[in-house]
């Protein structure tokens, strides 16, 4: 290597518990002191910068500080790298060898590993260097196996081991392995499921949330102070997307089940998605955001792959539910042109429409007739339910407990909001007093405003929930509320269809068979599931 008069030093420091690094000897502070002591009094060394990767494994080189150091080497700012020992630089013996034996010599970079007594300027790497690298990697492999075994044990016990809680939840302040509901985000999750069951498509839901100014999960986590980064999302994408909604609708975490171990990764390889039967799923580990019935309805609709429904455009509320009673094909909707039925909606057998009467008959039924039959049948079922008020009263004790938790969360959020407002005021005073620059003031103010806005929305959500609990606690149970509403309404809607019906089979002459999909609570009231056939002449 060509000797230079001065060496511009990159102090490289790395620590990773997953690699089995020891807290004392391998700590950031210990490495920093060791390197400082080594460089002290040596005039040929000029410290350019310190590069610290805290919490990044040495089994690969995809580390932010290491990447920044290599960029500085490429630009000629650094020509000497100093580390405590070889394992700090890397534990992958193949790539470590490439850097030490090829890249650094080719780019006139001096490499010093203090405790290994390695200095590329003073002597060539000895024969034991590759063996040391292999030992470092094998040590990392052994520790990695032990760490992953411990993680699997925790996962099977239903303990949360992730760095970031799933959107809608947060880590419990008293136990990082437990999840508690984040009420603001949870309301958004409930809204997504409600819109989807109500007939909105995934793209439509994403557009609705974006239009309402609701920030997406990754942006929400950042504004809550978490150092979160979604590796699957483009950096500029801070809005709701189809894929985000799609993943949310299929996430079992929202019904109280802990879902972990969905991906696997080898030391040098990329993460790969495992088959669902390999996932670690533990039921009932935390409070559910979505009730079981809502979840089942959403999953049923996902399997149907029904086209998006927009009720504002008079789209069919029966899409995905109507089947031909003879051939089993889905019915299709047609609107009669003016002069031929005055725009009345009819449903016809899909086989008949596509292939003709030689394969199946029309099975035609008007929308209004279908709606009348179903409404009358539902009213008959509702009339058989006695003492609804007594059932509702049973939920009051549970509601009171929830109200106490909500009040405690309100107090916490109010205190945090007050703290943020004081910080926002003080940063202005610092700017007026010329303690910080205008650029710093603008940055701080923007952060505090965003945090203030988020906390305000969270408080509004809790206050709305409190109102529901105090003013409408008797209607807390969703299926009871829906049944009471059906008593008085004159028109069927998509929500009722999804909640009550599994399938509608249509035969000739307006004869239909309704297969209901009642919840467990309704089944306990009725004792037997209803399957009714109605015939309108």
Image (cartoon, grey):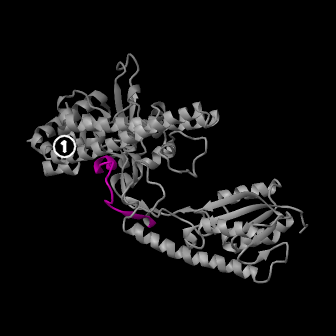
Q: Nearer the viewer, residue 246 or 185?
A: 185
Residue 288, x across and y down, in percent: 32, 52
- Left or right of 134 in this view: 498: left
In the figure, residue 125 lies in which quadrant? bottom right
Residue 328, x across and y down, in percent: 35, 46
**In which quadrant is the N terminus drawn?**
bottom right
Q: Is residue 294 magenta?
A: yes
Residue 474, x across and y down, in percent: 17, 39
Q: What's the residue at 31%, 53% (across, down)?
A: 287
Q: Which SS class for mark 1?
A: strand
- Left or right of 187 in this view: 370: left
For the question of whether residue 507 can be seen, the reply is: yes
Q: What's the residue at 57%, 51% (across, down)?
A: 232
- The magenta region covers 278-296
Residue at the far top: name it: 339
Position of 519 relative to 272 (above/below): above
Packing grade of label 1 (10 A; few <14, some 14-19, many >=20) is few
Q: What's the residue at 18%, 50% (across, down)?
A: 523
Q: Nearer the viewer, residue 202 or 515?
A: 202
In the figure, residue 234 lies in which quadrant? top right
Q: Nearer the viewer, residue 257 or 287?
A: 287
Residue 176, x across and y down, in percent: 40, 60
Q: Is residue 162 magenta?
A: no
- Residue linked to disc 1: 532
């Amino acid at each position: 290597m060509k000797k230079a008069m001065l060496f511009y030093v990159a102090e490289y420091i790395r620590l990773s518990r997953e690699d089995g690094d020891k807290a004392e000897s391998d700590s950031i502070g210990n490495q920093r002191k060791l390197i400082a002591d080594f460089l002290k009094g040596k005039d040929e060394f000029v410290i350019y910068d310190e590069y610290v990767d805290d919490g990044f494994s040495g089994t690969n080189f995809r580390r932010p500080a290491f990447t920044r150091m290599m960029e500085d080497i490429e630009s000629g700012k650094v020509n000497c790298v100093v580390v405590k020992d070889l394992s700090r630089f890397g534990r992958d013996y193949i790539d470590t060898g490439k850097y030490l034996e090829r890249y650094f010599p080719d780019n006139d970079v001096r490499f010093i590993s203090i405790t290994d007594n390695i200095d590329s300027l003073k002597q060539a790497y000895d024969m034991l260097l590759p063996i040391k690298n292999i030992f470092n990697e094998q040590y990392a492999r052994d520790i990695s196996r032990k760490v992953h075994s411990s993680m699997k044990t925790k996962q099977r016990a239903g303990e949360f081991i992730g760095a970031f809680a799933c959107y809608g939840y947060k880590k419990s302040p008293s136990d990082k392995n437990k999840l508690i509901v984040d009420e603001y985000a949870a309301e958004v999750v409930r809204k997504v499921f409600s819109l989807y069951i109500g007939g909105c498509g995934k793209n439509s839901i994403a557009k609705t949330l974006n239009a309402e100014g609701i920030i997406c999960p990754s942006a929400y986590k950042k504004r809550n102070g978490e150092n979160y980064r979604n590796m699957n999302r483009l950096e500029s994408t801070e809005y709701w997307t189809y894929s985000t909604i799609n993943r949310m609708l299929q996430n079992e975490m929202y019904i109280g089940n802990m879902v972990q171990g969905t991906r696997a990764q080898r030391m040098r390889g990329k993460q790969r998605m495992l088959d669902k039967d390999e996932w670690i799923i533990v039921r009932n580990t935390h409070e559910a955001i979505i009730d079981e019935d809502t979840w089942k309805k959403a999953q049923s609709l996902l399997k149907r792959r029904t086209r998006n429904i927009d009720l504002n455009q008079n789209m069919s509320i029966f899409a995905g539910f109507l089947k031909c009673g003879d051939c089993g094909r889905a019915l299709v909707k047609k609107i009669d042109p003016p002069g031929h039925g005055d725009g009345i909606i009819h449903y016809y057998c899909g086989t008949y429409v596509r292939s003709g009467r030689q394969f199946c008959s029309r099975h035609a039924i008007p929308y209004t007739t279908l709606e009348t039959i179903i409404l009358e049948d539902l009213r008959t079922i509702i009339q058989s339910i006695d003492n609804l008020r007594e059932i509702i009263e049973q939920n009051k004790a549970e509601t009171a407990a929830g109200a106490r938790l909500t009040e405690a969360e309100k107090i916490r959020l109010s205190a945090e909001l007050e703290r943020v407002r004081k910080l926002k005021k003080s940063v202005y005073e610092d700017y007026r007093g010329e303690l910080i620059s205008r650029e710093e003031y603008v940055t701080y103010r923007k952060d505090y405003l965003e945090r203030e806005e988020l906390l305000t929305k969270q408080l509004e959500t809790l206050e709305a929930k409190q109102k529901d609990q105090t003013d409408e606690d008797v209607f807390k149970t969703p299926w009871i509320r829906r049944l009471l509403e059906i008593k008085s309404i004159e028109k069927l809607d998509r929500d009722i269809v999804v909640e009550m019906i599994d399938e509608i089979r249509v035969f000739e002459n307006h004869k239909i068979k309704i297969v209901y999909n009642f919840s467990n609570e309704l089944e306990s009231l009725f004792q037997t599931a209803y399957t009714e056939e109605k015939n309108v002449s």
